[in-house]
Amino acid sequence: MPELSRSLQPRHITMISIGGMIGGAVRQQQRRDCRDRACHRLSYLITGTLVLLVMRMLGEMAVALPAVRSFTEFARAGLGPWAGFVAGWLYWYFWMIVVPVEAIAGANILHAWLGLPSWLLDCCSWAS
């Protein structure tokens, strides 16, 4: 059995902890919004089922169509040309609009914590 390597760097640990804090904050807000346990169970059941179904579908399509390399091509093969077109443009939108907006929001949060300029924190987040 090969030995596991200890290759996590401090930046990896930092990102894991930030993700844990964000997830905890979302969970706390959900707890405030939804008091009964049935609501929590239902939301986790729906989300988990959707994730499971999507991953199973992608796995089956990857086995059935080994020559296809892109998820947009999977959408095109499964649902038609319009689905591949929409998936491609949504992917572009995610990387061109959503990711920069989230980087700016994260830099503003870190600015409040550290006092460094937001533009510097934003540039550092893109560089790493």
Image: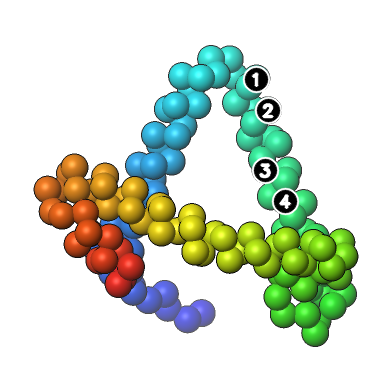
Q: Residue furthest left?
A: 115
Give residue 52's mark: 4
Q: CA distance from mark 1 to mark 2?
A: 6 Å
CA distance for labels 1 and 4: 21 Å
Question: Which secondary structure lies at badge 2?
Answer: helix
Q: Looking at the picture, which amino acid does disc 3 mark?
A: Gly
Figure check: 33 above or below 92: above
For the residue marked with disc 4, what is the amino acid?
Leu
Looking at marks 2 and 4 on the same chain, the residue that comes earlier in the sequence is marked by 2
Q: CA distance from mark 3 to mark 1?
A: 15 Å
Contact flag, marks 1 and 2 (Cβ < 8 Å): yes
Q: CA distance from mark 4 to mark 3?
A: 6 Å
Disc 2 marks a residue whose amino acid type is: Leu
State how far apart marks 3 and 2 are (Cα): 10 Å
Q: Is residue 100 left or right of residue 48?
A: left
In this figure, which residue is indicated by the disc labeled 3?
48
- At 64% from the left edge and 60% from the top edge, which residue is drawn? 90
Mark drawn on residue 38: 1
Residue tagged 2? 42
- Identity of the residue drawn at 74% across and 55% down: 54
Q: Quadrant of the C terminus?
A: bottom left
- The reply to whether discs 4 and 3 touch (Cβ–Cβ < 8 Å) is yes
Q: How many marks?
A: 4
Report helix, strand or loop for mark 3. Answer: helix
How far apart are the alpha carbons under marks 2 and 4? 15 Å
